[in-house]
Image (cartoon, rainbow, N blue to C red):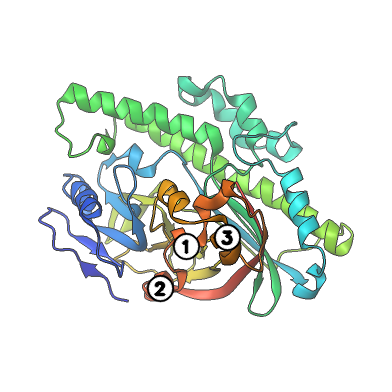
Amino acid sequence: MPYEQLPLSTSAPVLSWANHELGHEELKMAKNVASLPFIFKHVSLMPDVHLGKGALVGSVIATKEAIIPAAVGVDIGCGMCAIKTPFVADQLEGKLKKIRQDIEASIPVGFNDNPEVETTASNWQGWQRFKELHSGVQDLQVKAMKQMGSLGGGNHFIEVCLDTNNQVWLMLHSGSRNIGNKLAQCHISTARELAKLAGDRLPDPDLAYFVAQTNEFDAYWRDLQWAQNYARMNREVMMARFKRLVEKHLVGGKPTKPLLSVNCHHNYAEKEVHFGEEVYVTRKGAVRARTEDYGIIPGSMGAKSFIVKGKGSHESYCSCSHGAGRTMSRNKAKLHFTLDDLIQQTQGVECRKDPGILDEIPGAYKPIDQVMANQSDLVEVVATLKQVVCVKG
């Protein structure tokens, strides 16, 4: 689907790949961002776009000489990891429930952490730079080490999936855990204080920003890159444990080699070159999709997910959606749906079916097929997956 330019009176245009009409609050949020003086060229909205904090989830914001910490968000480096295994569907026969129980016993979810620090986690080189991070997190190193290799809560998940050729895939969704959240909060607070001192009349306090070549910008950028690397490593540690667990059930613990591995952020910022200029690109709920990039676009826990390859669209700043995107809030989903609805919508998936995950019911999300149709110019589908086991955070 080609994008459309939204009819907004802003200094920077807003290009949208969404097929639904944006509501008043969504348009206001898009307008607020596009009106900032340091926005480069235009703002791009992905097909799964929906309300966020300060900026829309599903937006790609390129900036010159400035960055908005709340636009990156508090789950710095949140993203996806997937591997294609050499296993096939028949090997899972009769083992799904036990695999789910083992995942739940082996990988901490919610606010929990690992009882011991895993060797791979303790050997991570990022710990050497921990003392350089914001003073507000200096008491959190032990917790951060124990949380490396843990899932978190909300919409984070671990899944065993099958592709259309009945090949088994392992997939998970997680970010930078408590340490990323705390780092983000420290810097968002500083940005807001600076805005107040400068008398900046921002359309939204959550759009407080740092200007390049200032101490505050440099400190945030350093901590941001550290947290993004932590998030990527967190997924790697978790995936290795997940893979060993599945190998135990399917081949008696014999190590196997993945046929394809993908690990991508969808809440992050990087320095990139677009339209011949170096800019800071913030992807708030969006995946990088250059021609050489593989990405992961998950549906909800009862729907399909997709492994994709980017097409390098300049207008989207080489980006695509990060999932289906919510159509209703968590509270609204709990009020709207029943436990029977959850059981019906997750039929054929080995997962929890209790009120604790009602807010993650597939009906609370946009139809993933429509989302994919809207970005056929941004990505090509490499594999279509359907989960058979799902563990929620």
For the residue carrying disc 3, how many other residues have a C-alpha within 10 Å: few (<14), some (14-19), or many (20+)?
few
For the residue carrying disc 2, how many other residues have a C-alpha within 10 Å: few (<14), some (14-19), or many (20+)?
some
Residues at marks 1 and 2, CA–CA distance in whole angstroms: 14 Å
Tell me which label, 3 or 2, sits earlier in the chain: 3
Give the label, 3 or 1, closer to the camera.
3
Q: Secondary structure at mark 2?
A: helix
For the residue carrying disc 1, how many other residues have a C-alpha within 10 Å: few (<14), some (14-19), or many (20+)?
many
Residue 209 visible within the image: no
* Residue on which disc 1 sits: 363
Image height check: is 128 above or below 370?
above
Q: Residue furthest bottom?
A: 165
Q: Please state which amino acid type lies under the numbered disc 1.
A: Gly
* Residue on which disc 2 sits: 370
* Residue on which disc 3 sits: 340
Give the label, 1 or 2, closer to the camera.
1
Coordinates of residue 324 in the picture (x, y in percent): 44, 63
Q: Are marks 3 and 2 in contact (CB under 8 Å)?
A: no
Coordinates of residue 256 in the picture (x, y in percent): 80, 62
The residue located at (17%, 39%) in the rendering is 203
Image height check: is 107 above or below 183?
below
